[in-house]
Image (cartoon, rainbow, N blue to C red):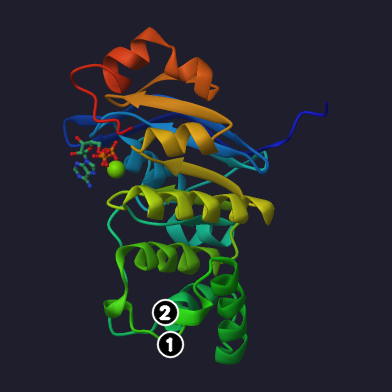
Amino acid sequence: MEEKKVVLRAEHITKEFGGLRAIDDASLYLKDNEILGLIGPNGAGKTTMFNMISGTLPLTSGKIYINGKLINKPVAHKMTALGIGRTYQVVQPFSNLTVIENTMVGAFLHTNDAKVAREKSMKVLELLGLAHKADVPGKDLALIDLKRMEVARALATEPTILLLDEVMAGLNPSDGLQVMDMIRQIKQTGISIIIIEHVMRAVMGLCERIYVLSQGKMLAEGTPAEVSSNPEVIESYLGGKHGNAKG
Ligand SMILES: Nc1ncnc2c1ncn2[C@@H]1O[C@H](COP(=O)(O)OP(=O)(O)OP(=O)(O)O)[C@@H](O)[C@H]1O
Ligand SMILES: [Mg+2]
């Protein structure tokens, strides 16, 4: 079988906030069209890792490669243009804008033409099962649709790599299953995906490989079966007293 190419590589990433080392020499890679999981206890540094990869915050040290090319100074607008899309752990809707207008905010990355942006956004909403709510204001959405809308805005930037930060948090199990289906649909379009998630059923069901961060360090990497039987991972997260993993 042909090895899939690596589309993203984060090497020896360190991030310090004042005296706190939130990420400590952690590395990961993402293969083409893979769904990769990033898990670990609260405060482990998962969101900070996304902030490094998306250029939202500057690295203290380390290197980011996209399609094998070293990215000099990964800043947000550059990373978005290079195909990195992301959602935020806390949903950030423009409440007074409609669903399609919220989505168009992403589409305007590639066009100044509102008609083109609207058409592209409508396609994304169709993929995510949100087209019938295109004209509903953000403030009138239930949580699951807010999450879909966040994903829609990220997809409208036409990413090749999508970073999803706890899209399932706060959802009931049946809504969680719908979001899992949505993530599979997105993968079908050829996008490579990293998910941060505390809902273990989802992580284990969706991901081909999983990385485990703990206190800023990469504790383990492997298939769902490997990671979930790793004693260190069980102790620090899955079964241990400090863990916050959800069934
Ligand atoms: N902008 C910031 N300034 C200062 N400290 C920060 C900042 N962002 C994160 N931290 C700290 O870095 C550490 C890692 O935080 P991070 O949000 O990356 O954790 P996480 O793994 O995403 O946790 P959770 O599962 O709770 O979302 C925490 O101690 C946090 O308080
Ligand atoms: Mg987080």
Residue 160 visible in the snapshot: no
Q: Secondary structure at mark 2?
A: helix
Q: Is mark 1 within 8 Å of ligand 2?
A: no
Q: Give the percent coordinates (x, y) of residue 65.
A: 58, 39
Closer to us: 222 or 54: 222
Query: Type of residue at label 2?
Result: Val
Q: For residue 4, what is the image quadrant?
A: top right
Q: Residue at x 35, y 37 (%)?
A: 46
Q: For residue 208, what is the image quadrant?
A: top right
Query: Type of residue at label 1?
Result: Asp
Position of 40 with respect to 133 (left or right) is left
User: In the drawing, what numbered circle is on residue 99?
Assistant: 2
Q: Residue at x 51, y 15 (%)?
A: 226
Q: How far separated are the C-alphas under marks 2 and 1?
A: 6 Å
Of all residues, the one furthest to the right in this rendering is 1
First-in-chain label (2 vs 1): 2
> Taking 60 as reference, is 100 above or below it?
below
Q: For residue 213, what is the image quadrant?
A: top left
Quadrant of ligand 1: it is: top left
Residue at image mark 1: 135
Q: Are marks 2 and 1 in contact (CB under 8 Å)?
A: yes
Q: Give the percent coordinates (x, y) of residue 37.
A: 48, 35
Of all residues, the one furthest to the top in this rendering is 231
> Taking 24 as reference, is 145 above or below it?
below
Q: Residue at x 31, y 53 (%)?
A: 171
Q: Secondary structure at mark 1?
A: loop
> Taking 52 as reference, is 130 above or below it?
below
Q: Give the percent coordinates (x, y) of residue 247.
A: 33, 32
- Mark 1 packing: few (<14 Cα in 10 Å), some, or many (20+)? few
- Mark 2 packing: few (<14 Cα in 10 Å), some, or many (20+)? many
> Taking 183 as reference, is 145 above or below it?
below
